[in-house]
Amino acid sequence: MHSRRDLLAISIGAAAAMLLASGAVVQAAGKATHIKNVTAFTMAFGDGLRLTAVAVEYDQAIDNSKLSLSTFSVGGRTITKVYANTAATPAEKGKNGRFVIIDLSPDDANALLYAANGQNVIQKEAKVSVIQTRSISTTSGDTYAGSTRAMANRSVVNLGLM
């Protein structure tokens, strides 16, 4: 049986491998998109590695006050918070910026990416599918229409231990 320290080391190693192996591009079939990148965030918990947030990078600063939980949809996940930020990093409070952070419930069945429990090992790639379902506003007054097109992450960042 693995100790908590072993599990943490394995989880961080798995996240690093996923980051290096991640070659998926932002998927937006058809016309050009204002979305430049999608990044998945993982965090190591006592029972394994979980996908806990997503950052969507835009070409302009987004008005934080116009975002809500219904602005985005994340396949198979529960959104707990949506806010803009100046960096691709989860934060306590949102502020106008080029990144929209989507916090996800770590308790979702699809959150767990890697865990070892005796002989049983769960190992999934940190993939996420995001849809901007409603219009959003930039700080300069532009409006980016909602869509049905899904964007997949092309990078993964591990936030460390919870």
Image: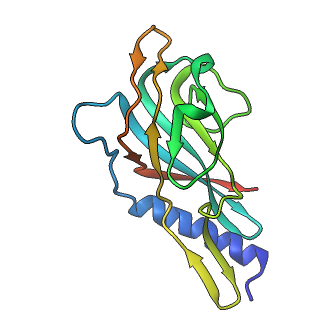
Which residue is at a point 55% across and 63% down the rendered structure image?
15
Q: Position of residue 124 (x, y in %)?
A: 51, 70
Q: Position of residue 147 (x, y in %)?
A: 38, 33
> Which one is in front, 159 or 120?
120
Which residue is at a point 74% across and 33% down the rendered structure image?
92
| Residue 84, quarter of the rendered image | top right
Q: Position of residue 75 (x, y in %)?
A: 50, 52
Q: Residue furthest left?
A: 30
Q: Residue furthest top?
A: 141
For residue 160, side relative to residue 152 (left or right): right
Q: Quadrant of the C terminus?
A: bottom right
> Which one is in front, 121 or 158?
121
Q: Quadrant of the N terminus?
A: bottom right
Task: Please say if 104 is above or below 116.
Answer: above
Task: Please say if 152 is above or below 20.
Answer: above
Which residue is at a point 45% across and 23% down the rendered structure image?
135
